[in-house]
Image: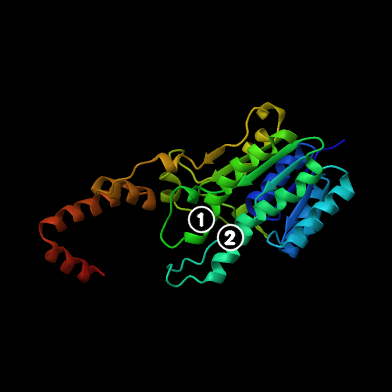
Amino acid sequence: MKKVSIITGGAKGIGAAIGYKLGKQGYSIAIADIDENAGKYRENQFRNEGIDSIFIRTDVSSENDVSNLVERVYEKYGRIDVLINNAGIGFSGKSIEEQTLEEWKRIIDTNLTGVWLCSKYVVKYMKNSGGVIINIASTRAFQSEPNTEPYSASKGGVIALTHSLAVSLSKYNIRVISISPGWIDTSKWQVPPKESYLSGLDHGQHLTKRVGKPEDIASLVSFLVSEDASWISGVNFTVDGGMTVKMIYIDENVIQDSLTLLFNDSYLSTLIRKLIDKAKENKEDIKKKLEEIL
């Protein structure tokens, strides 16, 4: 009998890539997503590719929706082996003074409470034969850009919830693991697919010299849900092309290297570097010359 995986936020991006990967490996895929058009698009795509799939519109912040999702999947397939808690929403980018309580609650309810709700309801059926829960967190749980407080807090909570669930559910032979992706270009997995517009600088700043792809996360998930990973539980995997271990101090060399990546032109970056050096000697003169050029 085929194994069954529920994937929240499964219509687009990382969730869709995970669904495709597992589906091609023989899983039946339940696509749970709040976007009905995207969900139907992905369901049709999967079926055309020979993947047994069903789309169920779900708002993971709604207990009724989550309960309905789990009951419908179990009613159709008679088992639930894997839950991928991937559904999530971003942030407004507003300062904390401008952020509203409504925004905070909306992000926490989707990104964190949704993980708790889906895990709570699948346990009813998963505990009979064991299973795996994978929670998609983010490197924003460890490091932040300005004005990301609701999102960063939600993803930090996902990691804490992961090890708590792993301990609580171990008696049922349920493994729980989180993955923290870094920068992932999801263009290909949008509905409809989009062109990617990443620069050399975007790619080159990573230790791996490229931005991540949803397939990178899907490949790790494929391993973690397999028997080869049966001794892994309660931990977080950071998958970010090495960005979180990269210590950066800004100086003229870093600026020059970044410009080379940005323009793909080492001669131009060398000229700009010389301009920077000249500006340190005579800032006002360089400002006048730049004004003339611009």
SS under mark 1: helix
- The spot of residue 80 in percent (x, y) is 80, 43
Dot 1 corresponds to which residue? 153
Q: Is residue 146 above or below residue 162?
A: below
Tell me: 25 left or right of 175: right
Q: Quadrant of the N terminus?
A: top right
Tell me: 244 left or right of 235: left
Give 171 or 106, whichever is nearer the viewer: 171
Dot 2 corresponds to which residue? 108
**Rendered residue at 62%/37% (across/down):** 220
Residue type, numbered disc 1: Ala
**Rendered residue at 76%/44% (across/down):** 123
Marks 2 and 1, how far apart at CA: 8 Å
Q: Are marks 2 and 1 in contact (CB under 8 Å)?
A: yes
- The spot of residue 45 in percent (x, y) is 77, 52
Give the mark, 2 or 1, whose residue is nearer the N terminus: 2
